[in-house]
Amino acid sequence: MKKIVIIGLAWLMGLASQLQAQNTDRGFEIAKNLEIFSSVYKQLNLNYVDDVDPGKTIKVAIDAMLSSLDPYTNFYPESDIEDVKLQLLGEYGGVGSLIMQRGDSIIISEPYKGLPADEAGIKAGDLILEVNGESTKGKKTADVSSAMRGQAGTQVTLKLERAGKVFEKTLTRKEIKLPNVPYYGYVGGDYGYIKLDEFTADAAKNVKEAFLKLKQDKPGMKGIILDLRGNGGGLMNEAVDIVNIWVPQGTLVVETKGKVASKNTKSFTRMQPVDTKIPVAVIIDNTSASASEIVSGSLQDLDRGVVIGQMKVTVSKYYIPSGRCIQAIDYSHRDEQGRAVKVPDSLKTAYKTKGGRTVYDGFGIEPDVEVEPDYMSNLGMALAQKMMVFDYATDYYRNHKTLPPASEFEISDELYADFCAYLKRRGLTYSTVTEHVIKQLREVASQEKYGDAIEAQLKDMEAQLVKEKEDDLQKHRQEVCEMLKAELLNRYYYDHGRIEGALKADKVVNRAIEELRNRN
């Protein structure tokens, strides 16, 4: 026995020495490389032909280093504090409007209701010529947005142009807090619907208040739909508290595991739930990330909700109640182009939900009910890229004071005919994949000396395509009407109206209602 103990102690001492040596080697390697980096920068500063901006150069180096790890480890300098506040808290100092680039110009794409830009009468479609006397010509949206943001209480002067008229507005910046729940209401008669855009501060509180209000207004509500499409995540504690609305206190929701064991965490629900019986459906898509996956995955693992939508590939090392890791990307291994690779099928493991269903790790969050996404037609893409719908809505809003309520508004035959006439006046042109293929075929045929032999057939095909494209506005009428409806509702009723108006034709929401009706 003594010999065994002595051997064991010797092995432990050897292991400790080995680890100490490894740590010493690692420390030396870090120090050596930091010294190399410092020397390189000193040489640049001394000998480079132009002056080197230290803040910009070091930031580029840090960003490049972090990008070799994963997409979600980022460095924010002090100058970007407003961006950090926006991501974590959903707030920033500014005037409350979205902007976008159009050629070399910047335009207002959407003022937020009741905030400085909206209160000053700034409208979607207004061209921003200057910010505090500095021209925006040729600048990127990020630069103009940064210039418009600033500490609450300070002023910013915008020179704008609308329908050929130039005017100025001096706005006092406010602390802008974007609503993480832009809309809630009823769909399908008896089913509640809550749209959650971000897991910023108070997200759980706002979702809970919306749910309670829906229950109060309709005590017989038969189910609830939580829409997480486009939700890139945010604060993990908010995700846990949202799950807590529908699952009992003390339930494990998520566990994080990393290199330092002392920093591993387990997050349990902390409060009494609001409703543990009502059927829950969670809608996701391929942009629902991080905290969205925690909510959808844990409700799925606990058999507390059905997940509906498109496949989601995750980027986070989180472990949900079944024990599975919801990571589907292996950032420790990369392909020849430096891209992280998917977890191979051979390493995927089966787990059981609370009710005994089989789920797998390594796939991200797989919906219980997968709904194929709708893909935009060539016509739809052309209308979006050329901003035809946006421009028509701008003109319409300037010439019409009112629009029917969002829940009632539909594109009439007269309105659609007017839009088609507008496109004709604007001379809308666009290319299709078929036209591109014909062009490639003509080039290849010419190279292989078949060009003259098939040119007549190619011209016939092109002529037929011209005729077919003339009917595109009727063939894709439903798609175009939804685009037009969304833009018009956004002008008159802001984001709230756009969401409400889109629900009726939303096939994923309708599928969620169908699943909630199926009690099995």
Image (spheres, rainbow, N blue to C red):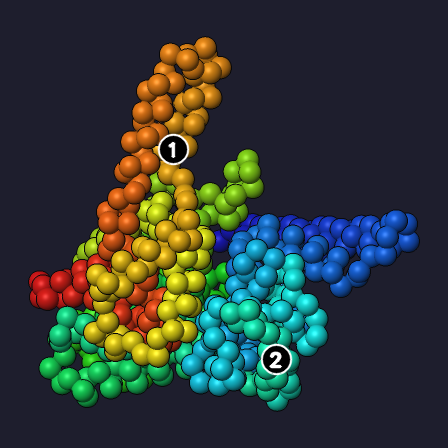
Q: In the structure shown, which secondary structural element does the residue marked by tag 2 occupy?
A: strand
Residue occupying image coordinates x 64% and y 86%: 154
Residue receiving disc 2: 168
Res. 336 image quadrant:
top right
Residue occupying image coordinates x 38% and y 73%: 399
Amino acid type of the residue tagged 1 in the rendering: Glu
Q: CA distance from mark 1 to mark 2?
A: 46 Å
Amino acid type of the residue tagged 2 in the rendering: Glu
- Residue 470, placed above or below residue 297: above
- Residue 366, placed above or below residue 237: above
The residue carrying pointer 2 sits among few (fewer than 14), some (14 to 19) or many (20 or more) residues within 10 Å by Cα, namely some
Residue receiving disc 1: 435
Residue occupying image coordinates x 40% and y 48%: 428
Percent coordinates x, y for residue 63 in the rendering: 64, 56
Percent coordinates x, y for residue 197 in the rendering: 39, 70
Q: Nearer the viewer, residue 520 or 250?
A: 520
